[in-house]
Image (cartoon, rainbow, N blue to C red):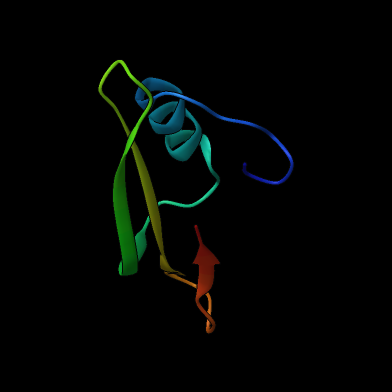
Amino acid sequence: MFEGQKIQGSSNIVAKLTSLPFQQCKHSITTFDCQPSGPSGGMLVFVSGNLQLADEQHALKFS
């Protein structure tokens, strides 16, 4: 979810990130967790951390 919009799949996530209105962003990952999902060999990955935009004083949280 990003601002109420559901985004799924790596190509859709990349498209959304590259469409955002900033040019530089630093990230720091604070936690990540992976676990098997479903009988067909899927994987569930949860990542959380901080995004620091170039012109912003405070970092944004993400998960």
Residue found at the far right of this picture: 4
Total number of numbered discs in the rendering: 0
Residue 49 in the image: state x and y as whole percent. 41, 68
Residue found at the far left of this picture: 41
Residue found at the far bottom of this picture: 57
Residue 6 in the figure: left or right of residue 43: right
Residue 44 in the image: state x and y as whole percent. 37, 39
Q: Nearer the viewer, residue 19 or 50?
A: 50
Instruction: Give the residue drawn at x 62%, y 41%.
Output: 1
Instruction: Give the residue drawn at x 53%, y 84%.
Output: 57
Residue 47 in the image: state x and y as whole percent. 38, 56
Residue found at the far top of this picture: 40
Q: Nearer the viewer, residue 35 or 47?
A: 35
Position of residue 32 relative to residue 57, above or below, is: above
Q: Quadrant of residue 42?
A: top left
Instruction: Give the residue drawn at x 33%, y 19%.
Output: 39
Q: Quadrant of residue 48?
A: bottom left
Instruction: Give the residue drawn at x 50%, y 26%.
Output: 8
Position of residue 8 relative to residue 55, above or below, is: above
Residue 29 in the image: state x and y as whole percent. 31, 67
Residue 11 in the figure: left or right of residue 6: left
